[in-house]
Image: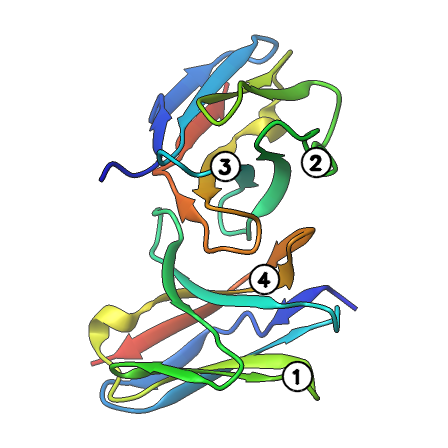
Amino acid sequence: GAGVSQSPSNKVTEKGKDVELRCDPISGHTALYWYRQRLGQGLEFLIYFQGNSAPDKSGLPSDRFSAERTGESVSTLTIQRTQQEDSAVYLCASSLSRDQPQHFGDGTRLSIL
Amino acid sequence: RKEVEQDPGPFNVPEGATVAFNCTYSNSASQSFFWYRQDCRKEPKLLMSVYSSGNEDGRFTAQLNRASQYISLLIRDSKLSDSATYLCVGGRDDKIIFGKGTRLHILP
């Protein structure tokens, strides 16, 4: 079946602009995660959604970052007033539940000029 | 102590050799463990889950040592295509943590 789908694949924008990244999880996966990965670095957890429960936002680095998910469907990650340090690959993953293996999308490569 | 810790490497290993990585975890209540591989500029992909009794998938063997709180990955008869970063993952249903990864270079 289809895997995790992310869009856009690449995004180049000017500092100060807002960006919205989209993730379409694997059908039936109730758990959805967002990560950030800077060049040459490890995965940095941002946020976790599980069904209709309150999301775990403990990894969001600042109030410029927010994410939404409606039920068990698509999620969007929004970064407001982008800064150059926001440049990274943003990865989305989904899983059947939090203790099950996560399956990743191809990521969105974000470049802030 | 980091929640999930790995030697960043790089490990430079000749083709055909056996290589082993360890990964330590700090939360003794952790229940779920996995190994992922990540190729350069690609997303992480699940390599294998790690079960309490240990498990094998072809040239790959994963083991869990609860007493010492570490998991291991053994790669036998290494191939050039095994060159990648290997991420260990540990946690339970309230928190899953990815390690920073161990870089492996298989040398021809």
Chain letter belonging to callout 3: A
CA distance for labels 3 and 2 = 14 Å
CA distance for labels 1 and 4 = 17 Å
Is A30 left, or right, of B92 in this rendering? left
The answer to whether marks 4 and 2 sit on the same chain is no
The answer to whether marks 4 and 3 sit on the same chain is no
Residue at 22% x, 74% y is B80
The answer to whether marks 1 and 4 sit on the same chain is yes
Inspect the image, locate mark 1, and give the three-letter code of the amino acid beneath it.
Arg
Tell me if label 3 and label 2 are in contact, CB under 8 Å. Answer: no
Total labels: the figure holds: 4
Inspect the image, locate mark 2, and give the three-letter code of the amino acid beneath it.
Asp
> Which residue does the numbered mark 1 point to in the structure image?
B66
Tell me if label 1 and label 4 are in contact, CB under 8 Å. Answer: no
Tell me if label 2 and label 1 are in contact, CB under 8 Å. Answer: no
Inspect the image, locate mark 4, and give the three-letter code of the amino acid beneath it.
Gly
Inspect the image, locate mark 3, and give the three-letter code of the amino acid beneath it.
Thr
**Closer to us: mark 4 or mark 3?**
3
Q: Residue furthest right?
A: B1
CA distance for labels 3 and 1 = 29 Å
**Closer to us: mark 3 or mark 1?**
3
**Secondary element at image label 1:** loop
Q: How many residues crowd mark 3 within 10 Å: few (<14), some (14–19), many (20+)?
A: some
Q: How many residues crowd mark 2 within 10 Å: few (<14), some (14–19), many (20+)?
A: some
Q: Which mark is residue A56?
A: 2
> Which residue does the numbered mark 3 point to in the structure image?
A30
- Residue B49, given in percent of the width and then of the height, sits at 44, 68
The earlier-in-sequence mark between 1 and 4 is 1
Residue at 67% x, 30% y is A53
> Which residue does the numbered mark 4 point to in the structure image?
B99
Is B103 left, or right, of B90 in this rendering? left
Above-or-below relation of B86 to A113: below
